[in-house]
Amino acid sequence: MRYTIITPSTPQELEQYFQLRWEILRQPFKRPRGSEQDEYDQVSEHCMLLDADKAPIGIGRLHFNSPEEAQIRFMAVKPDIQGEGHGVRIIQHLELRARDQGAARVIINSRDTTLGFYLKCGYELKEEADTLQNPMAEHQLVKYIDATNHIIYRPQWCHELQQTWQQRIPISDAMGIRIFQYTGREFECRALLARNINVHDTMFAGSIYSLATLTGWGMVQLQLQEKALQGGVVLAEGSIKYLKPLAEEPRAVVELDDMHGNMQLLKQGKNAHINVDVTVYDNDTPVAYFNGRYVVMAPRD
């Protein structure tokens, strides 16, 4: 299923946007229609996430408190599809907008129920609310924007994974392979074409294979951490289909739905076999399809 994010602008889109905001964030607390809007709406950036049928499933808003500080508010995803990575898509969109406009930090207010999600997205607790006295009180979180913290979800895990590659797979650093983004459901790595160019001024086939292999390997490792499991990841078998030369921007992407296997076998002391499909792009054009069979070796006593 393909999702898109739009800026609601037509009367119909705005009606859908504010209706969803009220249904999720105000109606459950018996607040009247109209309470979902405030005086900042006129000077804010709004986004609405649509599913493949163009139906709205999530919303969010960004406004600036000062030239340096942006604030994300009114984040909402339909309750029946929460936990599927849609909130991360909205956070990513709004953070990029804040970054593009020169924000030095982004703040978010959160109740206890959503605090864990924002912490996973790299936000730090700035002001802790007394939720014992007032369960509806909101904590304030902050993320400081710099050139290196563009990864939206589990940034510390991604940093540790990148360090592992640099220290234990030195060729990855020589190839300029870098983790570009992780959302919990999608993992993307990129490489520097200039370090992997052949006599035809396109990317070496072997470099494309290596980029895809590491991307699949990284997604398996991150999903192990998501499930609180341990094991050593190795590639047992890989195959790749090359479609066309890669001449501009190497990108390798894997979706969570492209992984198949049972990691829970590790709890029984058994190795887990995971099949992963990775697509390599030149900008937005697919240039290769990789399939890797990875083995996660169970820890031995």
Image: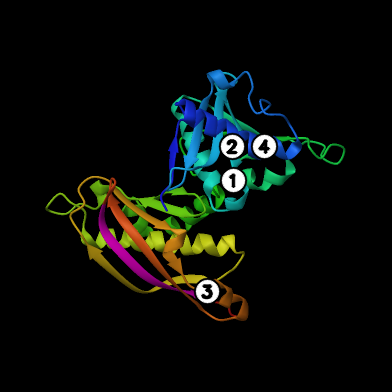
Question: How far apart, in angstroms, are the residues tagged by discs 3 and 2?
Answer: 37 Å
Question: How far apart, in angstroms, are the residues tagged by discs 4 and 3?
Answer: 37 Å
Q: Magenta region's main secondary structure?
A: strand
Decide which of tag 1 and tag 3 comes sooner along the chain: 1
Is 23 on the left-hand or right-hand side of 14? Answer: right
> Image height check: is 264 above or below 65?
below
Q: Secondary structure at mark 1?
A: loop
Question: How far apart, in angstroms, are the residues tagged by discs 2 and 1?
Answer: 8 Å
Q: What residue lies at 42% left-to-right and 53% top-to-bottom?
A: 1
Q: Secondary structure at mark 3?
A: loop
> Does residue 98 appear in this view?
no
Q: What residue lies at 67% left-to-right and 28% top-to-bottom?
A: 33
Question: How far apart, in angstroms, are the residues tagged by discs 4 and 1?
Answer: 10 Å
Residue type (three-letter) at the residue carrying disc 2? Leu
Q: Which mark is residue 25?
A: 4
Residue located beneath label 3 in the image: 262
Decide which of tag 3 and tag 2 comes sooner along the chain: 2
Q: Is residue 290 magenta?
A: yes
List the single residue furthest toward the right.
Answer: 133
Asked if the residues shown at circle 2 and circle 1 are in contact, with their CB atoms under 8 angstroms apart, the answer is yes
Question: How far apart, in angstroms, are the residues tagged by discs 1 and 3?
Answer: 29 Å
What is the crowding at mark 4: few (fewer than 14 residues within 10 Å), some, or many (at least 20)? some
Residue located beneath label 1 in the image: 78
Decide which of tag 2 and tag 1 comes sooner along the chain: 2
